[in-house]
Image (cartoon, helix red, strand yellow):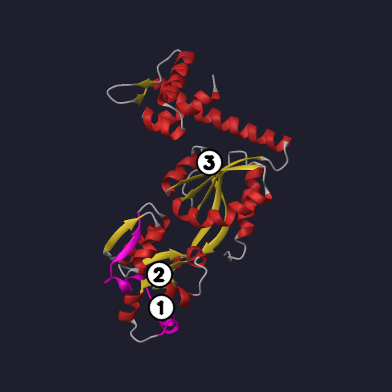
């Protein structure tokens, strides 16, 4: 039985569509079909029903479960042998959300590559739910996420804590705090709550994003239903529309600091005021998660240590 055939089989089993599976694997549909046929011939069984819709046969369901276990064992053994034979070599698959990846990866990857040139990194981006499922299935080695990671068998290493910032368009600041300087507004905003601005439209991340999950908890707790003018999974779009005065949005601390401006200059250049939220619910702990039952390679440990060092300036509780 060929490991490559098993890997291809699992992708088809997940997609239940040859076209989509072939696109995901960057191979032709004909080549992928040939791999599946060879596997069925080796096992002398049909793995898929082809009509009316593609579905796993009972044999296919059994093989999918066993294949995940077999490939996980192969990866672990390969990683262990690689650690034995090649110091500071290896392959690490890191999962991170699209939103977080835009900021964190530019901080992490160049320096890690320079320090560990022989470690191959594969970055898998997706939403929180998708990535937690992937690490549980052993499809990624590490997951950069916010605690708690509600998935079985996952241990976490704390990286940093950060808060959310409420982002007010200039016209909202002028309406609510007429004639005040930015410093005066910032002082008044120390006591501000989300519900104090419920009459304004909100620009929000999509419901599967961690920022939105946090804010939805606040809405539910306070029994309020905001007017959500727009939902998107692109956080830069939210800031750009906020700057145009379309509504209030929310930005994580790292993203605010990544702008590289003082708050006064940010308010002037971006036409947006950034105000840290004091609600404890908005304080998030970023962690790196890994499966406790899986072998954690030296390369993966090095990646975790590097990420911790990179964000050591952020205080942890």
Who's the residue at 55% across and 55% down the image? 106
Instruction: Work out which quarter of the rendered image holds the C terminus and state it.
Output: bottom right
Query: Of callouts 2 and 3, which one flags the residue occurring earlier in the amino acid sequence?
Result: 3
Helix, strand or loop under label 3:
loop
Separation of marks 2 and 3 at Cα, in angstroms: 33 Å
Who's the residue at 38% across and 27% down the image? 18
* Front position in the image: 163 or 237: 237
Q: Position of residue 129 (x, y in %)?
A: 42, 46
Q: Which mark is residue 47?
A: none
Instruction: Work out which quarter of the rendered image holds the N terminus and state it.
Output: top right
Separation of marks 1 and 2 at Cα, in angstroms: 9 Å
* Front position in the image: 231 or 34: 34
**Magenta extent:** 181-206
Q: Which mark is residue 140?
A: 3
Neighbor class of circle 2 (other Cα within 10 Å; few <14, some 14-19, many 20+) is many
Who's the residue at 46% across and 78% down the image? 264
**Residue 16 visible here:** no
Q: Which mark is residue 189?
A: 1
Query: Of callouts 1 and 2, which one flags the residue occurring earlier in the amino acid sequence?
Result: 2
Separation of marks 3 and 1 at Cα, in angstroms: 41 Å
Q: Position of residue 245 (x, y in %)?
A: 32, 70
Rendered position, 216 above or below 268: above
Who's the residue at 63% across and 51% down the image? 112
C-beta proximity under 8 Å, tags 1 and 2? yes
Rendered position, 96 above or below 51: below
Helix, strand or loop under label 2:
strand
């Amino acid at each position: 039985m060929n490991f490559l055939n098993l890997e291809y089989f699992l992708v088809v089993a997940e997609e239940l569509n040859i076209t989509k599976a072939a696109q995901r694997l960057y191979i032709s549909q004909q080549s992928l079909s040939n791999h599946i046929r060879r596997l069925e011939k080796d096992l002398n069984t049909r793995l898929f029903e082809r009509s009316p819709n593609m579905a796993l046969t009972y044999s296919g369901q059994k093989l999918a479960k066993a294949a995940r276990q077999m490939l996980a064992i192969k990866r672990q053994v390969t990683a262990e042998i690689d650690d034995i034979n090649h110091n500071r070599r290896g392959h690490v698959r890191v999962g991170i959300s699209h939103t977080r990846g835009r900021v964190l990866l530019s901080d992490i990857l160049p320096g890690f590559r320079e320090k560990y040139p022989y470690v191959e990194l594969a970055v898998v981006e997706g939403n929180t739910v998708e990535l937690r499922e992937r690490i549980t299935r052993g499809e990624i080695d590490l997951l950069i996420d916010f605690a708690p990671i509600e998935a079985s068998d996952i241990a976490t290493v704390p990286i940093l804590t950060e808060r959310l910032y409420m982002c007010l368009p200039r016209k909202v600041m002028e309406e609510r705090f007429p004639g005040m300087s930015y410093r005066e507004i910032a002082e008044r905003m120390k006591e501000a709550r989300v519900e104090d601005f419920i009459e304004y439209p909100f620009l929000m991340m999509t419901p599967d994003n961690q920022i939105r999950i946090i804010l939805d908890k606040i809405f539910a707790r306070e029994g309020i239903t905001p007017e959500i003018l727009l939902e998107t999974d692109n956080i830069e779009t939210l800031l750009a529309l906020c700057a145009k005065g379309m509504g209030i949005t929310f930005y994580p601390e790292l993203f605010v600091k990544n702008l590289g401006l003082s708050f006064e200059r940010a308010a002037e250049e971006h036409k947006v005021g950034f105000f840290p939220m004091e609600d404890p619910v908005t304080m998030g702990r970023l962690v790196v998660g890994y499966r406790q039952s899986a072998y954690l390679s030296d390369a993966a440990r090095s990646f975790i240590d590097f990420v911790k060092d990179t964000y050591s300036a952020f205080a942890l509780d």
